[in-house]
Image (cartoon, rainbow, N blue to C red):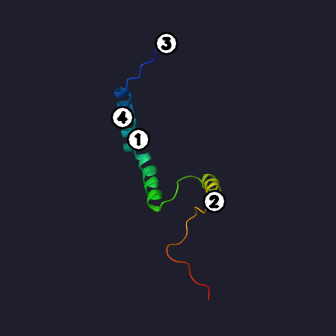
Amino acid sequence: MLKLELNLPALRNIILIEYRSFIRSEEDKKIIEEIRKQTRLGKPLGDGGFLKTLSENLGRSLSFRPKGRPWKNR
């Protein structure tokens, strides 16, 4: 029987190296900024189809609405 030993410290170092290279790359900085923006807004990030499916599954709208209280109809 083959026994597989997992070297956790080495695995952790590999993950950290990959994460650092992801964060430092220029193209990914745009993606990270978009993630931060959506997090600040409290909205999920994804394409239209994903957001529509998520909205339907949650039973609530995930579309952007203007800030503040809605206008009263006169």
Q: Amino acid at mark 3?
A: Leu
Q: Which residue is mark 2?
A: 59
Badge 2 density bin: few <14, some 14–19, many ≥20, Cα 10 Å: few
Instruction: Residue type at mark 1: give it.
Output: Phe
Relative side of 27 to 55, left or right: left
Q: CA distance from mark 2 to mark 3?
A: 49 Å
**Residue 4 versus residue 35: which sits nearer the camera?**
4
How far is the residue under mark 1 from the one under mark 3?
Answer: 34 Å
> Which residue is tagged 1?
22
Q: Can you tell which of label 4 and label 3 is closer to the viewer?
A: 3
Q: Secondary structure at mark 4?
A: helix
Of callouts 1 and 2, which one flags the residue occurring earlier in the amino acid sequence? Answer: 1
> To which residue does mark 4 refer?
17
Residue at 52 percent across and 53 percent down: it is 45
The image shows residue 30 at horizontal and vertical percentages of 44, 51
Q: Position of residue 3 (x, y in %)?
A: 46, 14
Q: Nearer the viewer, mark 1 or mark 2?
A: 2
**Residue indicated by mark 3:** 2
- Badge 3 element: loop
Going from the N terminus, do you reach mark 4 or mark 3 first?
3
* Earlier residue among tags 2 and 3: 3
Amino acid carrying label 2: it is: Gly
Question: Dot 4: few (<14), some (14–19), or many (≥20) neighbours within 10 Å?
Answer: few
